[in-house]
Image (spheres, coloured by chain):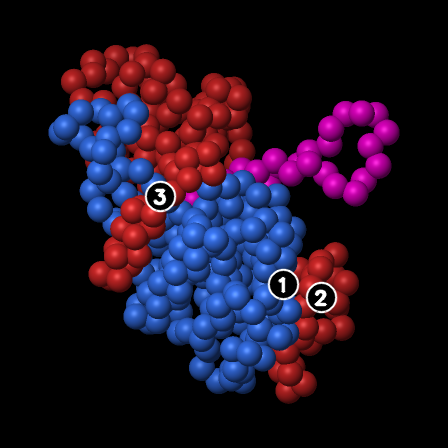
Chain colours: A red, B blue
Amino acid sequence: MQAHDEFDPGDTQHGLPHRDAVGGFGEEAAPDSEEAGPLVRPYVIAQGRDHADAVQLDMISVVIAAKRAEVDEMALEPEQLRILELCRRPLSVAEVSAHLDIPVAVVKVLLSDLLNRGLALARAPYTAKSPVSRDVLQAVLDGIQRL
Amino acid sequence: MASRDSDPGPEAPVPSALKILVAGGFGAGKTTLVGAVSEIAPLRTEEMMTEASYGIDDLSGVESKTTTTVALDFGRITISPSLVLYLFGTPGQERFWFMWEELSEGALGAVVIADTRRLETCFAAVDFFERRGVPFVVAVNCFDGAHQYEPDEVREALSLNPDIPVTLCDARVRESAKQVLLTLMNRVSEQVAA
């Protein structure tokens, strides 16, 4: 992997390194030393299910707990109750994952179960299949301008 | 905004989300830039990614895969009650290419942060967005004490098309980070119009 070991990143005296127009190379400056953490627990929470039944959710699908829904607490995982609690206001899948410290993939599984039970609602993000309109682009531009 | 499908009712409008990616090498200032414009302190999420093994002969026909956990920092800008923009700092190293694939799906565009002390750490991201046709701009993060380069020197070093904007920025400063996003949005609009 380290094809360019000889390159000294601290040396900028000789100008900038040049990228090959095709290919380039990815120096692994500092591999993330993030501990992988225990993987068993999330799969236990998700009851062994995987991505397969969570395909419709994206990392930025926005989710909200359904109002007036009757929640049978005994039928749900504790993490699902926490998700419903958290999603009284609309939050993305990524935010739910960050707040509850549960990996995105697991949140998707727990959420799709809640969606199937009618306890939560999700709105799909804009995708390549639903191209962003000029109005939306202008709204984003104006929104950033207001920052 | 007109309601789209699965509207939960007037009392609980669910906004649609958009995303912009912020790519660059380790320590280039991705999370700093996200934090400078985000309305929330950047959040961290972990995504478990399945990476098909690549470049290894597969004799048995059994797919060989490894699972990697990748941390992503992101921020949020509420544009309107019906629209939320998320900014995702994406791991810059080439070994995460499989992840960019998923992340870039549906992204409005990308900011590639160039750190002139280690310019090569953004090569892979430039390659990726170029090949994918994802609208992007290059923001040169001006670190204190780093040798200052002109945008054109960076453009040349990156072999960029003349129409790709290259701007200098200080990722810590909101106004500066905001200008980078505006440059990107103008680029996105141009590309949509083209």
At label 2, the amino acid type is: Asp
Please name whichever residue, B191 or A48, is drawn nearer the observer in this view of the structure: B191
Q: Circle 1: is it few (<14), some (14-19), or many (20+) Cα within 10 Å?
A: many
Which one is closest to the eye, mark 1 or mark 3?
3
Please name whichever residue, B137 or B75, is drawn nearer the observer in this view of the structure: B137
Image point 63% across, 78% down: which residue? A16
Residue A56 percent location from the top left of the image:
44, 26
Q: Earlier in the sequence, mark 3 or mark 2?
A: 2
Are discs 3 and 2 located on one and the same chain? yes
Please tell me whether residue A108 belongs to the stretch shown in magenta: no
Q: Circle 2: is it few (<14), some (14-19), or many (20+) Cα within 10 Å?
A: few
* Residue farthest toward the front in the current orientation of the protein: B194
Image point 33% across, 65% down: which residue? B178
Residue B65 percent location from the top left of the image:
69, 34
Q: Quadrant location of the N terminus of chain A?
A: bottom right
Label 2 sits on residue: A20
Image point 48% across, 53% down: which residue? B194
Write down the region rendered in magenta. B45-69
The kind of secondary structure element at disc 1 is helix
